Image (cartoon, grey):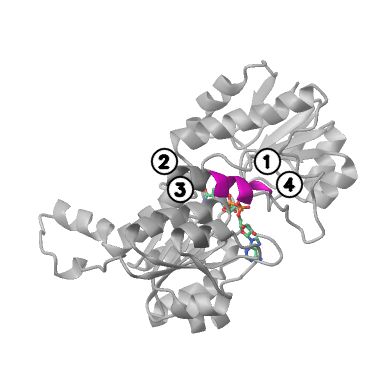
Amino acid sequence: MKTIMYSIQDFERSYLLQANREHHELTLLEEALDERTAAYAHKHEAAVIFTGDDASSEVLQKLHNAGVKYLAIRAVGYDNIDLKKATALGISVANVPEYSPYAIAEHSIALMLALNRKLILANSQVHHHNFKVGNLVGFDLNKKTVGIVGTGRIGSIMARILHGFGCRLLGYDTKENKALSKYFDLQYVDLKTLCKESDIISLHTPLNTATKYLINKALIDEMKPAVMLINTARGAVMNTGDVIDALETGKIGYLGTDVYEKEKGIFFYDYSKNRIKDEMLKKLMSFPNVIVTPHQAFATQEALTNIADTTFYNLNCWAKSKQTKNELTSKESADGYVHSPWGKLVVKKIKQDVSE
Ligand code: NAD
């Protein structure tokens, strides 16, 4: 099947080429999908995109006009795709619903530990031959309360890891996963209680109409002083302006974020020579108690292999006129996000691991 792939980064190219076992005819582009580049899809049956690509209504119309029937995203989140429009145009859309929740959970833990134990500062100090410890004092994670917002695939792995640290776990989700309470003593509470009681809050919901700016001034006001906030979900799950205000007053004591609400066009690109112009991001990066990583939580060898394999599984199904089990357009629900059946599978896996 003639397939165009947008936003291809050097590091993923070899994984994708290796996964193309059925030899689809590929056009690989470094450029992102947008209203202009949609024209490159002319005479391609399938398009493959990533999180920073624009699959809005207008762009989908252009892909449809160009002849695209299938759209695969090499990611879990698909908040950049107008699924209603795709459905109306008859474009089948599929994602990679699970590639390695461990990659994202482990990156969230890395942010937590690096912030708490001031690893970036420590590394910089010792490189300047300063071996003093006075400004590097952190806190034990053991017995601290961690609030996990969104206890799906990634949030479940967070619960498992943090249980190992000896943390008290609170969870907030529209669907409760009883296995997390049974095996890891996670207690489901409402979001306000989670904010009031947590020393660390970690975000793991998709971005949708209900979760946009879920973390805002009103909720931040409920949080403990100097709370640590970790966001590896999507930038707009938190209101960045409100978070910056809270960093300024010290209400938020630490922020570790792998995502930024205006990351499109910035993350995944090298601006080291001409510098970025985004004032809000510059402000965020100016705080010593903030770590920003460039949407890299997914970037492990295992995750990249699984992303490539599942993306080509989706394409292989479509090439044989079959539906893929990752189809989003057929499952689209009224509340704007897909209800994944995966929660049950995570429970099963955790049970197996616990009994091993
Ligand atoms: P998942 O679907 O398994 O879990 C999401 C959970 O959020 C579900 O349990 C769902 O019930 C819950 N949820 C949805 N709406 C909610 C709401 N309004 N309030 C409370 N809970 C709500 O997804 P996942 O695999 O755990 O991934 C979560 C998100 O992480 C993805 O949607 C994506 O945006 C982000 N992600 C980021 C990276 C990265 O590299 N930084 C990589 C993968 C995924």
Q: Which mark is residue 271?
A: 3
Q: Which residue is mark 4?
A: 55
Q: How many C-alpha atoms fall within 10 Å of the one at disc 1: few (<14), some, or many (≥20)?
A: many
Q: What count of labels does the image hold? A: 4
Q: Determine the quadrant in which ligand 1 lies.
A: bottom right
Q: Which residues are magenta?
A: 341-348
Q: Is residue 297 visible?
A: no
How many residues crowd around disc 3 within 10 Å: few (fewer than 14), some, or many (20 or more)?
Answer: few
Q: Quadrant of residue 308?
A: top right
Mark 2 = which residue? 356
Q: Which of pointers 3 and 1 lies earlier in the amino acid sequence?
A: 1
Amino acid type assigned to the residue bearing label 2 in the image = Glu
* Viewer-proximal residue among 36 and 155: 155
Q: Looking at the picture, how far across and down is residue 219, in whole percent?
A: 55, 79
Q: Is residue 193 visible?
A: yes
From the image, which quarter does the N terminus lie in?
A: top right
Mark nearer the viewer, 4 or 2:
2
Q: Is residue 77 above or below residue 143?
A: above
- Name the residue at 83% across, 51% down: 84
Camera-nearest label, 1 or 4: 1
| Disc 1 versus disc 2: nearer the observer | 2
Which is nearer the N-term, disc 1 or disc 2?
1
Q: Earlier in the sequence, mark 4 or mark 2?
A: 4
How dense is the environment of label 4, judged by Cα within 10 Å: few (below 14), some, or many (20 and up)? Answer: many
Amino acid marked by disc 4: Ala
